[in-house]
Amino acid sequence: MSAPRLVLVLLLGIAGPLFAQPAQEPAALLERMVQALQGLEYEGTFVYVHDGRVDSVHVTRTLGPNGPMERLVTLSGDRREVLREPGGLRCLTRGGTVVASAGAQAASLPGRLANLAQWREHYRLSIAGTDRVAGYEATVVDAAPLDSLRYGYRLWLDRATGMLLASMVREASGAPVEQLAFTQLRLQQAPDGATTATPADASPVQPTSPSRWRAVAMPAGFTLVSRVPAKGDSEHLLYSDGLASVSIYVEPNGRGLVGASRRGAVNAFGRAADGAHVVVIGDLPATTVAQIAESVGRGD
Amino acid sequence: MSIDSKTLEQLSALADGELGPDETRFLLRRLDAEPELAARWQRYHLARACLRREPALLPDAAFAAAVSARLVDQQRPAARRSWLRSAAGGAIAAGVAAMALFSIATPPQGDGTGPVLSSVAPVRTNDLELRQPVQRVSDRVWAPLPVSAPIDPQLEDYFLRHSGAAASAPRGGFVPYVYVVATPASAAAPIPLRESSAPPPAQ
């Protein structure tokens, strides 16, 4: 072998390992996913497999000076649409009938970001492999729960931006509960002057007093991340362990769901408690949601 | 007919632009006449393309050889000193190393045309199996389509408000809205709860 080729071989042997894609920590990949989901503009179509159905949904997200705007429209089955604007949130059906609406989502409490670190404590994170989704090269990250109180997640993340390309929510046993995968996706950076925070995030409404309601059976790792303003004495508390979120609604004079209901991986359970009606909704197994709901009561 | 080691070395040198003009002309004539040698020449380029993560388009053997020959012709005859030759080889090597860096560190463009090189264990198809079997096509043809569950405005309201609040949680973005917008096939239908085998949750 001639000298130049020998040099070439030696250089490639040294340069290859040095310049190879650096080993990425799964926790760091999840951090990038959070930034991409909230900091990018995107438009695309994904399929959503849930409850024995396959739906296709078109999503658009833009970022403006007043915060993000999102629009999701079903392309199969009944026409449904979710529209999120800085001023509120609406769910519409065919003909523009408003099914439900909510005001500005707000009152993020300090410590919300601290939840990111909790991933390590309640999920075993690992890289499952590589794949390709909607034409994007993806790194597949597994978040396996360390107990049976929560779901596990398999996430396909774009290698370039960290954007979530596909996801599978699984029971602790590994059985899929719901799946989502983009078939077409266009990503772009947010324009200058855009913000990911809503006006409500910028001036959160801090509760003047701690909530009088407690959920004794809240699984370890779930911390209060927001307390959304509600009418009268009603309360809406949001807890998260970093990946899963669970809402507790307390309506002093409310009536409504009694027992369990489900949408994909999101379970709900309602019951009467201490003179109020309590509804718990979260992407947790039905048994966990029921246990949380059964444990809600006045803490004073 | 097997290819002897000397010819292989000449092929390698031709690919590297290091074969002398006379030897190049001789080897090009052989490439035209010997299909086995031409096939080896193509495989040689394919291997190089794979090493550089380039799209593996097989070049026409004669075309590629002619290009190499032109490059050789443009070089000065072998009157260079050996140290200069080594330095040039080093520069080429550094250039190739830089290409390796570029091709590895540059994120894919997402247009679906690039090669797929799995570095870790691939995701198994079995992982994508549904927990509940999908209805067979024949069933769907003859069975009436499922009617959407009646909408319970209050429950819809709870689901929507939860998704709005969860959108600011770490796994936020559009994800929390997906189950709200999807067809509520079983939204209002109570589901049986199975007994939990989980240990009592800790506070």
Image (spheres, rainbow, N blue to C red):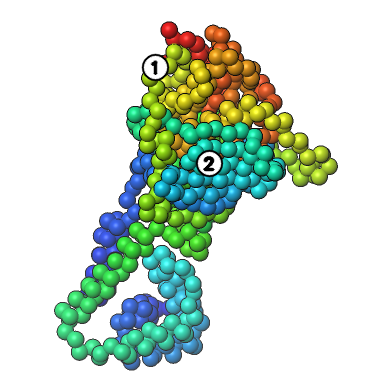
Asked whether B190 or A287 is in front, the reply is: B190
**B4 relative to A50 in the view: left or right:** left
Local packing at callout 2 (Cα closer than 10 Å; few below 14, some 14-19, many 20+) is: many
Q: CA distance from mark 1 to mark 2?
A: 29 Å
At 47% from the left edge and 54% from the top edge, which residue is drawn?
A: A187
**A300 relative to A92 in the view: left or right:** left
Q: Are marks 1 and 2 in contact (CB under 8 Å)?
A: no
Q: How many marks?
A: 2
Figure quadrant of residue B95? bottom left
Picture quarter with the C terminus of chain B = top left
Picture coordinates of residue B62, whole percent (x, y): 47, 85
With respect to residue B135, does A163 lie above or below? below
**A258 relative to B46 in the view: left or right:** right
At 64% from the left edge and 39% from the top edge, which residue is drawn?
A: A92
Asked whether B58 or A115 is in front, the reply is: A115
Picture coordinates of residue B86, whole percent (x, y): 20, 76
Q: Which mark is residue A210?
A: 1
Query: What chain is tagged by disc 1?
Result: A
At 42% from the left edge and 67% from the top edge, which residue is drawn?
A: B54
Residue tagged 2? A84
Query: What chain is tagged by disc 2?
Result: A
One can see residue A29 in this view: no
Q: Amino acid at mark 1?
A: Pro
With respect to residue A45, does A116 lie above or below? above
Figure quadrant of residue A178? top right
Asked whether B61 or A165 is in front, the reply is: A165
Picture coordinates of residue A57, whole percent (x, y): 61, 46
At 83% from the left edge and 42% from the top edge, which residue is drawn?
A: B142
Q: Amino acid at mark 2?
A: Arg
